[in-house]
Amino acid sequence: MFHPSFRGGVHPKDHKSLSSGSAIEALRPEGEMVYLLNAHIGAPAVPVVQAGDRVLVGQKLADPGGFVSVPVHASVSGTVKSVGPHLCQNGDTGLAVTVENDGLYEAVPGFGQERDWRRMPKEALIGAVRDAGIVGMGGAGFPTHVKLSVKPDVHIDTILCNGAECEPYITCDYRLMLERADLSVLGMQILLSLFPDATGVFGIEDNKKDGMEKVREAIGRADNPEGRTMVVKSLKKKYPQGGERMLIYAVTGRKINARQLPADAGCVVVNFSTLIAVAQAVAFQIPLMHRVVTVTGDAVARPSNFDVPLGTPFGILFEKAGGFVSEPEKIISGGPMMGAAVYTTDLPVTKTTSCLLCMTKDELGNYEPEECIRCGKCLTVCPERLMPIKLKNAADAGEYDVVEKLHGLECIGCGCCTYICPARRKISQSITAAKNHILAEKRRAAMKQQEAQKKE
Amino acid sequence: MKTLNVSLSPHIRSGGTTRRIMLDVCIALLPAIGVGVYVFGWRVLLITALSVASCVLTEFLYEKLMKLPVTVGDFSAVVTGLILAVNLYATAPWWIPVLGGVFAILVVKMLFGGIGQNFMNPALAARCFLLLSFSRIMTDYPVLDGVTSATPLQQAAAGEIVPLGQLILGTHSGTIGETSVLAILAGALYLFVRRVISPRAPLTVVLSTVAFVALFTWIRGDAVTLNYLAVHAFGGGLLVGAVFMASDYATTPVTFWGQILFGVVVGLLTAVIRCFGGSYEGMSFAILISNLLTPVIEKVTYPRPFGLEKAKKERKKA
């Protein structure tokens, strides 16, 4: 079969068989639940509850803090214990609402009630997505309603569901394909109703043949009076196939760069889990307060996929996965290629926690980098066609203008260069650090300019 | 629980190491050296051993003396030693490989900062140093029993026809590792399959050399026969140079088009030296000169990032 694909990329061992066989298990944890208010891209949410308030399942705990922001909902019923700073995944502290779970799971009125979304106007649909607090659940956490609010002059012809799941180890989207394909098709239909000329495409990597089949069956089964086109597209198994730009290229043949949005290529891209969240929010009035998390790695006794209420502490997930067979040296929230290493397990599941990977060995940290031998492998694997080693050298020397000139801002941080480097150099890490520095400088300059304009 | 490790992503890596790559190159050189032993006798092993020992020891002593971390474990000095040996005649006196090894590692590699930092191929630079310093010894090719003693390139220059079978098997005069097409191709294939090098540079070197030799011979008004071109492709040091030296990491471009451009430059220079120069061989000097052009070639062949290809074209139009 023909697979269009980007040039470059790597083929890490995927280790998916650890957890791909275990069906999604619903967890009903007890004890404290912690809701981080900044676990998405954009402004942090603003709390609307106080310590001592009783909250119900599906009740709003915090309002969006701006247009690019989302509300946060309670996933359990209980009493608000505190509203205050809590440790976040990136090591920073941010505001969080802590709720003492009473175990009753009493829900707000109307929760889970079906509604006729076909009669809802476009604005109400996008509003429902926003009010449900939906963000991209693949890892980035960009508010979905912002993606859907495209300018009227932009023509969208493809709604792309990102089912690539190209990171090793993660199996949450795969399990959802097998078990909840119908909901994903419903979510796709809802999004399609926003864009009259769009086709719905499920892009799925070809290592998930049965997942593709389930989605195809669900499309065939779906109640589709509008006759909208929905197709499943097989993608070549290669990391980072699920990168937004790579995915758009694989499906439409169009290329976008760092300064463009998917909308510039006529696409709206949503993750598979997100699509299911959209279906639940719009058709059943269930806000985003659950997600499927893969708990895996060689340190875990029983690698599993759990459907957990958001706010559940990591510790409970490890416990339910049978505990640790050996002491982990590194725990990663997300996949091994782009996930964030955490230094403590005192963190809650957020909307973007797709996977908790517990590794007994830190494959990268235990080695000292050697001298570059100029093998050029980093160039070969770079999906953005950059020269990673040149960028790294410039970044390490603090020559940020050179990094920018060599298109360093195009880097998507996929990590292929570090993965392949035979000298174990931390190429991607240096580039990411330089990129963050440059972007921070730019934001600072923009803010200064704004202030100057205000004074005038 | 002990403290968890934290670092920026990614958290896994491929198993590839510098040592593994260098070992692969050593393995790929074995068939050529093996044929060398078969054709020129056991003395080949002595030359090879001396060359490798000299390279490794020089690197070790230099690093000990300068109090640097010892890096001989990465096998890159062994590769340099093997490539140097491949480029020598089996009849060379014992001090030739020893001196060559010291020059290659000390002057060309370590003084410029060690692995990855040298701007010229150490083994080739050493060969050229020896060639210029001891030209009589270095051009004293071995006389083989039973077959003509001249190298194929000399025979071709004299207008003789060289049997192809002899070229492919390697039963003719030349340096230790350059004679057998079959052995070199076996090594090349191994490197391609193991993805140590890409076939881009070697292929362009061979193709462009043959093309330019044909062009220049035609300009000179001599007859361009197939046998003549085959001898140029397979007879001298072209093939071994194309596979093992025009693909050297440190001294050739890392960019896709850079490697192709590098190959063409090497081909052009080789053909110029072979057709118009004073030497039958041109490969070593051609590669060394091209090594110097590497930074420029890399600069002009910087890849176009994903999604920015169109922007450039449009800007040009505007």
Image: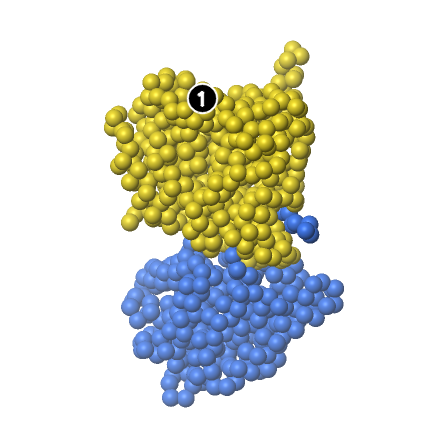
Chain colours: A yellow, B blue
Check disc 1: other Cα within 10 Å, few if <14, some if 14-19, many if 20+.
few
Q: Residue at x 63, y 75 (%)?
A: B54
Q: Is B140 on the left or on the right of A93, as rendered?
A: left
Q: Is A449 on the left or on the right of B259, as rendered?
A: right
Q: Residue at x 43, y 83 (%)?
A: B39
Quadrant location of the C terminus of chain B in the rendered image: top left
Determine which residue is flagged by label 1.
A110
Residue A129 is situated, as x and y percent measured from the top left of the image, at 45, 24
Q: Amino acid at mark 1?
A: Gly
Q: Is residue B88 above or below residue B246?
A: below
Residue B80 is situated, as x and y percent measured from the top left of the image, at 56, 69
User: Nearest the camera: B259 or B107?
Assistant: B259
Q: Is A234 on the left or on the right of A326, as rendered?
A: left
Q: Residue at x 65, y 45 (%)?
A: A343
Residue B68 is situated, as x and y percent measured from the top left of the image, at 71, 63
The chain carrying label 1 is: A
Residue A336 is situated, as x and y percent measured from the top left of the image, at 53, 48
- Res B1 visible: yes
Which residue, as the protein is rendered here, is positioned at the far top? A456
- Res A264 visible: no
User: Nearest the camera: B82 or A456?
Assistant: A456
